[in-house]
Image: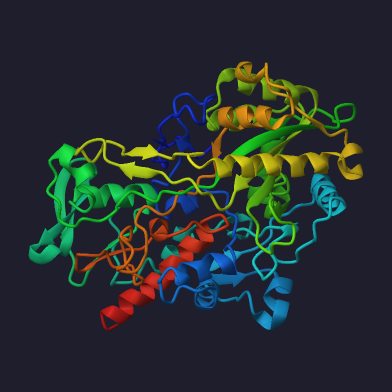
Amino acid sequence: MIYELQRTIIDWEYVSEPSRRYTISSSNGLSWPRGLVLGGSGTINAMKYVRGNKRDYDHWEQLGNKGWSWDEVLGYFKKSEDNKVGKLVQLDQGKWHSTGGYLSVDYNDISDPMNNVLMEAAKEVGFEELDDLNADKHIGYGQSVFTIVNATRCSPAKAFLSPVRYRKNMHVIKHAFVTSIIFEQLNEARGVNFILQNQATLRAFARKEVIVSTGTVNTPKLLQLSGIGRNIDLDPFKIVQRANLNVGYNLQDHVAIPLFVKLKKSTAKPVNIYLEKIINLYNFLFKDRRQSTRNHDVSGVTILANTINVTDPYPDVHFEYILFKKGGISSILITRSFGFNEDVVESVHRAELEANVLLVRIHVLKPFSRGKVTLKSTDPYVDPLIKANYFNDYEDLKTLIRAIRIQQQMLTTDALRKNEAELHKIHLPACMFILHDSDEYWECYIRHLTLTLYHPAGTAKMGPSSDPEAVVDERLRVRNTTRLRVVDASIMPYIVSANLNAATIMIGEKGADFIKEDNGF
């Protein structure tokens, strides 16, 4: 349901600013869906459970963030986890995974033959098969695990909130829109102002401290509305500055691009997508739930690669795959959700009418470009300004071109040639006079069909006092304030080389221990 859940009442429906550098075929800017719902974006995401790697977290510690090395965060990943895959739990005497946590982690079904084709193609070009994408090897291909339980989504709300919902010391107020943080003298956070059901303006006071967990977009917005940020961002709105911190900057995202590959043009049989959905729903409700989730769009297969140095043990790109079956309408739904113009949508759909189509999404895992989130207004209901600044550093674009060349190698393998693999050429008027398949052509293509992987991070950067860009310290306390802490993906100094859900849950687990320790629990 990932794409059906976007642009609904449980999505903040953010849109990043358009730019001449990218998203030229999404002239209104890129859709940045964020979960406006219990469980946050983990309730509308793709459910992949990927942690990142040792280099990611060791780098955090090397920057001066004591306690955030890989060896120290691994225990917090395991603390959350109830891993249902026996071979992963037993790997290396249980070093990587655990059972008994709140968060259920399992394989989805990848019985679709296309999965085997992709893995065979990856093997042919020299990639190693990885038993576990969350262990100590990170270059190769393998099967992802997902936050699912009994063939349903295991969101953070279902995992962590539902089991304790009857505790007397917990109260959740739904439909409460926080507008600002209440401070007393010496920048001591005392509580929050909020609007209940768009009507009553109320206050909530904290006995111990205020914890902000509103995400990479909303956390900087709330801090800035409360006077925490740079004067250059606050002065235009006549907001009195309480703390001069680099709030909203250091924005990072896994920028991505799509390729579309036609398969089995002469042999693929058209599907009745509506009948298939009805059968899946019937099986889910009345038979074996797992039978209803078998068509999982091939996204269980993942390839991780380093485009610069094949001997480097850590990846800089990530490939994932989604299958559109011949005669369906999946391509329309997904390409429109990307924000592409109708010419691009129609081009991909025409390919879907004549063949199966494999959507290849290629992601830059370690982007160099940095963006920012700042206010548009003092009205808390006005969305902030999101400047993604993709390709401000040209190296990110070169990484994608190198990754395209890897995918092209895969198309020449026996495994994919047997399936009549053919790259679908999208007509882009701005690129038509550039030599096709040259680096210049792919640069033009990338700038027109830029995607987000929905992984914003970094806007309340964690760092030591010597770091002028740091917003929070290594215990996630907001600098130059007291009784105020941020616990979400915005604290990442550098984005991890993975989907962010697992890492954000780890931050929550670690932050919870900080709160208990600092308050004597």
Count of marks placed on residues: 0
Q: Is residue 294 above or below residue 274?
A: below
Residue 346 falls in image quadrant: top right
Residue drawn 89% across the image and 44% down it: 415
When the figure is inspected, residue 238 is found, relative to residue 169, above or below; the finding is above
Looking at the rendered image, the quarter that the C terminus falls into is bottom left
Choose between 187 and 392: the one closer to the eye: 392
Q: Residue at x 89, y 37 (%)?
A: 417
Q: Is 23 situated above or below 112?
A: above
Q: Nearest the camera: 433 or 359?
A: 433
Residue 377 seen: yes
Residue 225 drawn at (x, y percent): 20, 47
Q: Which quadrant does the N terminus fall into?
A: top right
Q: Position of residue 66 (x, y in %)?
A: 41, 76
Residue 178 seen in render: no
Residue at x-position 58% and y-position 56%: 498
Question: 406 or 48, which lies in front?
Answer: 406
* Residue 94 in picture, x, y percent from top left: 66, 80
State the scheme by which the image is colored.
rainbow
Specify the quadrant of the image occupied by residue 499: bottom right
Residue 196 in the image, given as x and y percentages of width and height: 22, 47
Q: Residue furthest left?
A: 185
510 in relation to 357, above or below: below
